[in-house]
Amino acid sequence: MTKFISRTILKKTLLLLAVIACFAFLGFFLGQQRQRASQDVQEIERLATPTFETKLNNEFEFPIEEAPVEEASFKISLMEAKKVKLIAMQGEPIQAEADQEFLVISLEIENKNNFPFEIDSQHYFRVKGEENKSYAPDFYNGAIEIPAVSTKKDELAFIVPAEQKQFKLLLGSVIEGGKEEIEINF
């Protein structure tokens, strides 16, 4: 009988040790996962932090093409320019190559009219490059609707050399011609 009790105690002890070992392994594994996730978040925050940024206080008014009334217009206000290594597009992170960064232009589009209209802001912005080439935004939101009597925020991103600190932003309708030149210096 004592042999039976000894075997039962031994089996229960081994089972208890196996359960403790499983919990210890799970604790270690989950701790490693949390540590990796924390490191990933820190890396994303580092890449998304602007290397340079500057406030822009420029406002421009444009006619609304195909407006239901004559002389309807909207206003684009340039808010900020910044350079970052990481942007999000449709919820997915996009990282610039080692020798590149993103020049991100933040803007507001104001509609004081009593009717909505759509705008694709990429058609109003270019970055002037070498040999007077005009570069369109590499990342943009596409056509957005601006409801009546409201303002919407928008952003555009251009891929630029990481070491470049001076830019010439061209603002104006691609179709209509004349463009305003805004200098951005970091």
Image: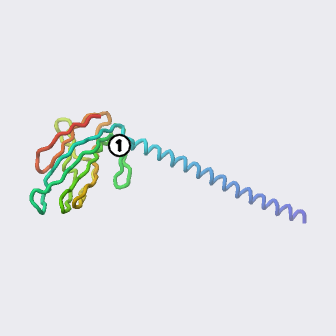
Q: Residue at x 70, y 58 (%)?
A: 19
The amino acid on which the numbered mark 1 sits, given as a three-letter code, is Ala
Q: How many marks?
A: 1
Please tell me which residue lies in front, 74 or 24: 74
Measuring 81% from the left and 59% from the top, which residue is drawn there? 10
What residue sits 63% from the left and 52% below the top?
Answer: 27
Q: Residue at x 24, y 61 (%)?
A: 147
Percent coordinates x, y for residue 110 in the rendering: 22, 53
Report helix, strand or loop for mark 1.
Answer: loop
Q: Quadrant of the C terminus?
A: top left
Residue 111 on image: x %, y % = 20, 56
Q: Which one is in front, 56 or 32?
A: 56
In this image, 183 relative to 20: left or right?
left
Q: Residues within 10 Å of mark 1 (few under 14, many from 20)?
A: some
State the scheme by which the image is colored.
rainbow
Image coords of residue 39 (percent x, y)? 50, 44
Looking at the rendered image, the quarter that the N terminus falls into is bottom right
Residue that badge 1 annotates: 96
Task: Decide which of 72, 50 is in the foreground and name it.
Answer: 72
Q: Quadrant of residue 66?
A: bottom left
In-image side of 99 versus 76 (left or right): right
Q: Is residue 148 above or below residue 96?
A: below
* Residue 53 rendering spot, x and y as whole percentages: 32, 39
Residue that lies at the very extreme toward the right in this rendered image: 1
